[in-house]
Image (cartoon, helix red, strand yellow):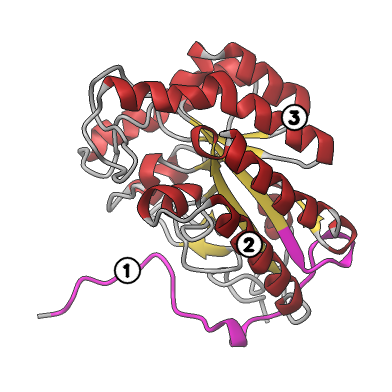
Amino acid sequence: MRLPMNDRYDYVSIKDRVPYDWPNGTRLAVCLSNNVEHFAFKAGMGLNDSAVSAPADYRSYAWRDYGNRIGIWRMFDVFDELDLPWSHNVNSTVMELYPDIVAKIVERGDEIIAHGRTNSERSDGLWEEDEARLIAETTEVITRHWGRRPSGWMGPYIAESAVTSDLLAEAGYKYTLQSPCDDQPIWLRTRSGPLLSIPYPLELNDVGVYVRRHHPAPVFAEMMMDQFDEMLRLADDQPLVYSISLHTFLVGQPFRLKHLRAALEHIAAQRDDVWLAKPEDVAAHVMSLPEGIVPGSRPPAA
C-alpha cells in the first residue's frame, strides 16, 4: 500500500539552490514575530504551565490575558527603544476587544498576520466549508479594524488541515507561516496556484522553550543569539530567513523580558549586516524574483 505523501512541495537540497540577495546586498533576513491571542472564557482549548492543549480554566485565561494587559506593552517599549520592526500573528477577536493594542501596532507600522479567530479552537478538524468560513470571517474582521487586508496567515497552533493551503490561496492570501520545513521561502502547490511559505520557527518559539521543555530565560536568549550568529555565517553562501516566535504572556514577564532585551540588542547591534524585515516584505521580494530562483517556482522560459 502506498503511503500518503505530501504533494505541497518537492525535495530540494539546500546545496542545490540558486543564490540570490535580499535588499541592499544582504543575505540574512530577520523576521521577529509576536503572537497576540484571545481565549474564550473557560471554554475550548487552554494552556497550563506544562501542556499547550490543557482544558481551559480561569487560571489559564487570566495567565494569557496578562500578555494583553501587561506583557505586550513592556515588549513594545523594548522594540521601540531598539527601533526594530515587528510582525504580529493576531486573533481576529483581539481586533475587537483590544483596540489599544491594534492602535499601537498601526502607529508602529507593524504587520498584522491573520491568526484565526481565537486560540480556543483549531481549524485542522473542521469540515472544509467550516474552515473556509473561519478564514473568511477572520479576514473580514482584521481588514475592517486594521484598514487593510492581511496578506499572510498563521493559524492557531500552526494547525493545517488537508485543504488549508488550498483555502488560503482561494481566499487571496499571498503567504503562510505554517510549513517550518526550510530556512528559505519556498512555493507550495495548491489547487488554485502557488502559495508562498515563509520560514517560521518551532525551535525558537517561547512556548516550546518555556512550556514544553521548561528551559530558563537565559537559555532562550542564548538560543536566539547562537542561531543568529550561525545563520549570519551560513548566509555568506545563500539567502536565509532568521525568525523567532514570541508570546506576550511568556516573554512579557519581567524576568524573561530582561533576557529578550539582551538577545534583541545583540541582533540590533548588527543591523547593518542583515535585512530587518516583516514577512510581507520577504514575500514581496521573493515575488519579484525571476521564476526558477525560489524552490517550487517554475523554471525560466528557454
Residue 6's disc number: 1
Q: Is residue 198 above or below residue 82?
A: below
Q: Quadrant of residue 293?
A: bottom right
The stretch of residues the image draws in magenta is 2-29
> Which is more toward the observer, 38 or 199?
38
Disc 3 + disc 1, Cβ < 8 Å: no
Q: Residue at x 61, y 76 (%)?
A: 299
**Mark 2 and mark 3: span between their CA atoms?**
21 Å
**Mark 3 and mark 1: span between their CA atoms?**
42 Å
Specify whether 222 is left or right of 138.
right
Residue assigned mark 2: 222
> Does residue 242 show up magenta in the picture?
no
The mark that comes first in sequence, 2 or 3, is 3
Mark 3, mark 1: which one is toward the viewer? 3
Question: In this orientation, does residue 175 appear?
Answer: yes
Q: Is residue 6 above or below residue 148?
A: below
Disc 2 + disc 1, Cβ < 8 Å: no
Mark 2, mark 3: which one is toward the viewer? 2
Callout 2 amino acid:
Glu
Crowd band around label 3 with a 10 angstrom C-alpha radius: few (<14), some (14–19), many (20+) = few
